[in-house]
Amino acid sequence: MFDYETLKIIWWVLVGVLLIGFALTDGFDLGAVILLPFIGRTDSERRVVINTIAPHWDGNQVWLVTAAGALFAAWPVVYAASFSGFYWAMLLVLFALFTRPVGFDYRSKLDNPNWRARWDWTLCLGSFVPSLVFGVAFGNLFLGVPFMMDDTMRMSYTGNFWGLLNPFGILAGLVSVAMLTTHGATWLMMRTDQHLFERSRTATQVSAIAFLITFIGAGLWLWLGIDGYSVTSVIDFNGAIDPLSKTVEQNNPGWMANYAQYPLTRIAPIVGIAGGVLALLAASSNRSALAFLGSSLAITGALCTAGFALFPFLMPSSIDSASSLTMWDAVSSHKTLGIMFICAMIFVPIILVYTLWSYIKMWGTIKVSDFEDNPHGLY
């Protein structure tokens, strides 16, 4: 079995992979439903949009549950701090996500335009809010979260929900919304035809431009206007769990230290920007699969950019830097990480194979005529 230090790095990578997996899979159905009221001009067209994600949306959300479970098992202190500190934000996301299964199931129960229009906007809002809040939460990590721990490891949080809605946090939220909307639009390009395809292509172009502007803008703001944190004491990579044993200073201009120390990490923002450009250009030339690849690269690059900048911090503290939680000292025991690693090596490949199989079996273009021929057999 791997040593303690290696397992910590492995689980940092695995949780990152789970978050990217969630953004890539659930991201396109969140983005598609955000666009629902805008690109679907008729009831049949909106049903086409919904049914492009119908076989997958509930399974895609399992990635979020799995990431949260992995966070709890690998970094329990971070789980406790984030789910208490971001309590109201998490509750808002939860209630927004509640509208999705209800909306999908009840929207077409009544053949009433007003009833369906209300559910369409409810579904749109229920997808927009999580997309925004996830980005806002990530943005606030760069600013530091207002929490601290006392000598007995008891944690106290001094912030509130409205404090999360600072200018940089909102900008990070807009990056997330634009990124996922681009992903959803490219998905619809692959799964629809005729008028819906044309509107999806336009939506891809607009949202890709918005992503590039907000992503580059957030990066420049971070680089020029926000100081990050650095661990200035000697790190015991195989030591006991004690977040208060280290010394942390806010001396990392723009969170750029890792990019200077490890030049290979600079690939991440390049991939993010290149992915957005690829999605834009591919949409302009009607190449839907290439556009989807571009939006996937944009998501992967953007999340890796954030992760590489923060490393090794998981949740910096803005009021007591020594209480900041890192992957080295807010982690589970060696034995726990080892058992989890074995389980992950067994079950994650099975899940990936099944997911790929389900997408292959349920692939195809959905057309408006499908609802004219079978008005009661689909969402």
Image: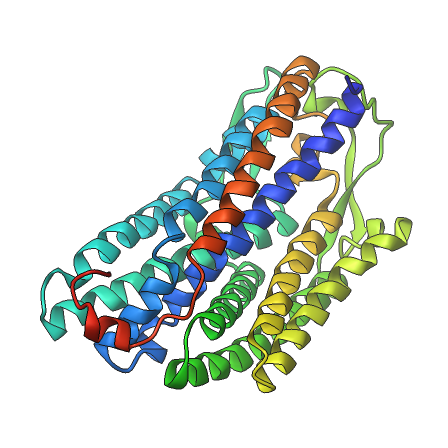
Which quadrant of the structure image shows residue 65? top left
Q: Is residue 80 left or right of residue 7?
A: left
Image x and y of residue 153, in percent:
59, 19
Q: Residue at point 74% right, 64% down?
A: 271
Image x and y of residue 8, in percent:
73, 28
Q: Is residue 205 left or right of residue 253?
A: left
The reply to whether residue 336 is in sight is: yes
Q: Residue at point 48% right, 38% down?
A: 85
Which quadrant of the structure image shows residue 334? top right
In the image, is residue 341 above or below residue 361?
above
Image x and y of residue 299, in percent:
61, 60
- Report the quarter where the N terminus lies: top right
| Tag count | 0
Q: Residue at point 69% right, 64% down?
A: 272
Viewer-side residue, 15 vs 286 = 286
The reply to whether residue 318 is in sight is: no
In the image, is residue 356 above or below residue 366?
above
Image x and y of residue 137, in percent:
53, 50
Q: Is residue 322 left or right of residue 184?
A: right
